[in-house]
Amino acid sequence: MNYLWFSHQHCYGAGENVVRMRIRILPPSGPPFTLRAVLDTGAAISYFDRALLPSLGIADVTTGRPIDLRAANGERSTGYVHPVDIEFIGHPMTIPIAFCPDWQEGTDNLLGMEGFFEQIRAAFEHRARRFYHAIH
């Protein structure tokens, strides 16, 4: 029998409908900074607010790999994927992150399946507001 082993447990706020975690962004130049992102197992890829582009040293978002993005409301737009170095609970990783120049600034940062959840084992106990994970 196979068991899933998790090395970390984190609690999130009782009033939260989503799991938001703090992550460190490790830009190629400039100091690291921290932000909050939603752990979204329904997102095919990670998506971050376009306001972060200058902090990541990305002058032209369209230099990334184009991808079709669909918002929760069904709106479709073209996003551009760039590799971004992050640190999640002490573990550095590089993940593909999509940025959409058409979506307004202030959109939630989402950590999705491609790249992020491929590198961690995760479980959610939403009623108890707990997130469990282990890095592969």
Image (cartoon, grey):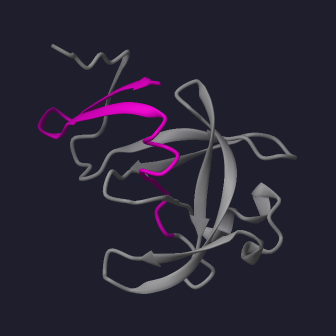
Q: Quadrant of residue 72?
A: bottom left
Q: Residue at x 87, y 46 (%)?
A: 29
- Residue 26 appears left or right of 112: right
Between 87 and 78, the one lying in front of the other is 78
Residue farthest toward the front in the current orientation of the protein: 1
Q: Residue at x 18, y 40 (%)?
A: 126
Q: Is residue 122 above or below residue 40?
A: above
Q: Quadrant of the N terminus?
A: top left
Percent across and percent down for residue 79 are: 58, 75
Q: Is residue 15 magenta?
A: no
Q: Is residue 92 above or below residue 64?
A: above
Q: Quadrant of residue 117?
A: top left
Residue stretch rendered in magenta on the structure: 107-136
Q: Residue at x 76, y 56 (%)?
A: 56
- Residue 12 appears left or right of 57: left
Q: Residue at x 58, y 85 (%)?
A: 102
Percent across and percent down for residue 136 are: 47, 24
Percent across and percent down for residue 91 are: 58, 26
